[in-house]
Amino acid sequence: MNWFMYRIICTTLCLAGFFAQNVWAAKEFIYCSEGSPSIFNPQLASDGATNNATHSIYSRLIDFLPGTTRLMPALAVSWEISKDGKQYTFSLRKNVQFHSSKDFTPTRTFNADDVLFSFNRQRLENHPYHGVGDLPYQYFYSMGLDEIIADIQKVDDYTVRFLLTKPDNTFLAALAMTFSSILSKEYADILSVQDRKTMLDAQPIGTGPFVFQRCTKTQP
């Protein structure tokens, strides 16, 4: 495992460099922020410190090409849009590994179940994780996705279809934002059985290039 140091003025995050191809060279990376992350799940936060700290822990279906607003494949390798603009079908990347921790070792790779879990947690009030934590899904609702997304269907393990209530030109861009990060359903299911749901947002498991190790608050 390669090691990185992600340092914030008020919070020190120790992260392990991670990627399926193990291409990261060992090094130390110092990052200074104006404050501490409020939580380690960008779905639940709107502050810059949280979004900056978690952006590289998680991955999204699509991303912005660095320095631009152009979209590029990420966890989705491609997508198709129906002629009426109300169906978006995503082909998912295969063999993407979730991170491991001292409390969790994944038994499978990323698949459609994780996509449905990550978005349904935010949009469905009866979802078992919707009410976990005291923070609202501010970005999800401010972008109007609760009204735009009519349903999300698992076509197969590596194909997901979003059904919209109406065409929306901003939909793909919303999926590239940090709040659209993909979490591990397997990790969430284990924490639910253990009655430790809040750990999902405190000890994050993602597929990004950095692996969360610990958070230690320090004095400026």
Image (cartoon, grey):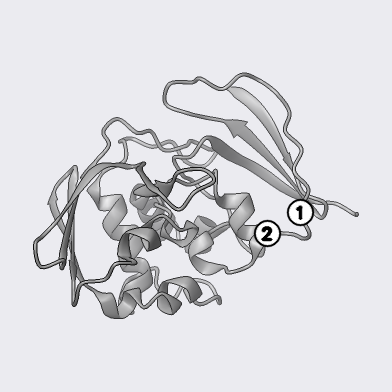
Please report the residue visible at 27 percent of the width from the left and 58 percent of the height from the top: 116
Q: Quadrant of the C terminus?
A: bottom right
Please report the residue visible at 23 percent of the width from the left and 42 percent of the height from the top: 78
Q: Quadrant of the N terminus?
A: top right
172 vs 154, left or right, is right
79 vs 219, left or right, is left
User: Do the CB atoms of the residues marked 1 and 2 lie less than 8 Å apart?
Assistant: yes
In the rendered image of this protein, does residue 137 appear above or below residue 74?
below
Q: Report the front residue among 19 and 170.
A: 170
59 vs 134, left or right, is left
Locate residue 197, reporting x and y percent.
47, 62
Q: Amino acid at mark 2?
A: Ala
Locate residue 170, reporting x and y percent.
34, 67
Q: Report the front residue among 187 and 2.
A: 2
Q: Secondary structure at mark 2?
A: helix
Residue 55's disc is none
61 vs 42, left or right, is left
Locate residue 60, reporting x and y percent.
40, 49
Please report the residue visible at 50 percent of the width from the left and 76 percent of the height from the top: 138
Q: Secondary structure at mark 1?
A: loop
Classed neighbour count for the residue bearing mark 2: other residues with Cα under 10 Å, few (<14), some (14–19), many (≥20) = many
Residue 102 lies in what quarter of the image? top right
Mark earlier in primary sequence (1, 2): 1
Cα distance in 3D space between marks 1 and 2: 6 Å
Q: Which residue is mark 2?
A: 49
Locate residue 69, reporting x and y percent.
45, 53
Q: Which residue is mark 1?
A: 33
Q: Report the front residue among 23 and 204.
A: 23
Q: Amino acid at mark 1?
A: Ser
Please report the residue visible at 49 percent of the width from the left and 20 percent of the height from the top: 22
In the rendered image of this protein, does residue 5 appear above or below residue 215?
above
